[in-house]
Image (tube, rainbow, N blue to C red):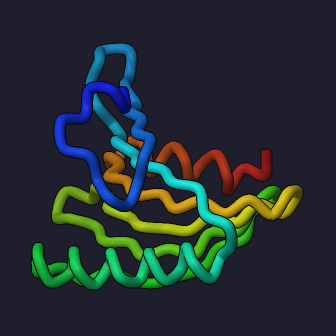
Amino acid sequence: MTDKIKKESPYVSNYWVTLDNANKVHRVTGHESFDNLTICQAVRKDLSSRLEEKYNIDFEYFEESYSDFKIYSGYHFNSSGDAFAIQCNESYSDGDVALQIFIRSKVLSDAVFEYYDSGL
């Protein structure tokens, strides 16, 4: 997917698209690795404020711990329930830190939350 992007973001260098069996797009993600959480958080905060101003939206900040990683995230939900997020993910096992920027459909969001809530 990355080679199909015509105007690249200065914030991310890799992109993914999540499709269902009918080729409907449910998620578009940009990803970038960082040396540490402090740098990632600074970029996340800067990008969040720029997008809030540009699109007249508010990101709600929260942190969530999972079995393998922790996220530090700003989320915005549109009127359809789709999620727009900018987050730093910190891996417990190797300390890797990555910035993710994504828009995700309500259908996929519901499935993701159901998976993590199941305890798998």
Q: Residue at x 72, y 50 (%)?
A: 118
On-image quarter of the N terminus: top left
Along the viewing direction, whichever of 43 and 20 lies nearer the viewer: 43
Along the viewing direction, whichever of 16 and 25 lies nearer the viewer: 16
Q: Residue at x 62, y 69 (%)?
A: 71
Q: Could you say which quadrant of the image residue 77 lies in?
A: bottom left
Q: Is residue 87 left or right of residue 79?
A: right
Residue 36 against residue 19 in the figure, above or below: below
On-image quarter of the C terminus: top right
Q: Could you say which quadrant of the image residue 82 lies in?
A: bottom left
Q: Residue at x 28, y 31 (%)?
A: 25
Residue 107 against residue 58 in the figure, above or below: above
Q: Could you say which quadrant of the image residue 57 lies in?
A: bottom left
Q: Residue 23, percent across and down?
A: 29, 18
Q: Residue at x 37, y 32 (%)?
A: 2
Q: Residue 6, percent across and down?
A: 18, 35
Q: Is residue 34 left or right of residue 53?
A: right
Q: Residue 116, percent across and down?
A: 67, 53
Q: Residue 16, percent across and down?
A: 42, 35
Q: Is residue 74 left or right of residue 26?
A: right
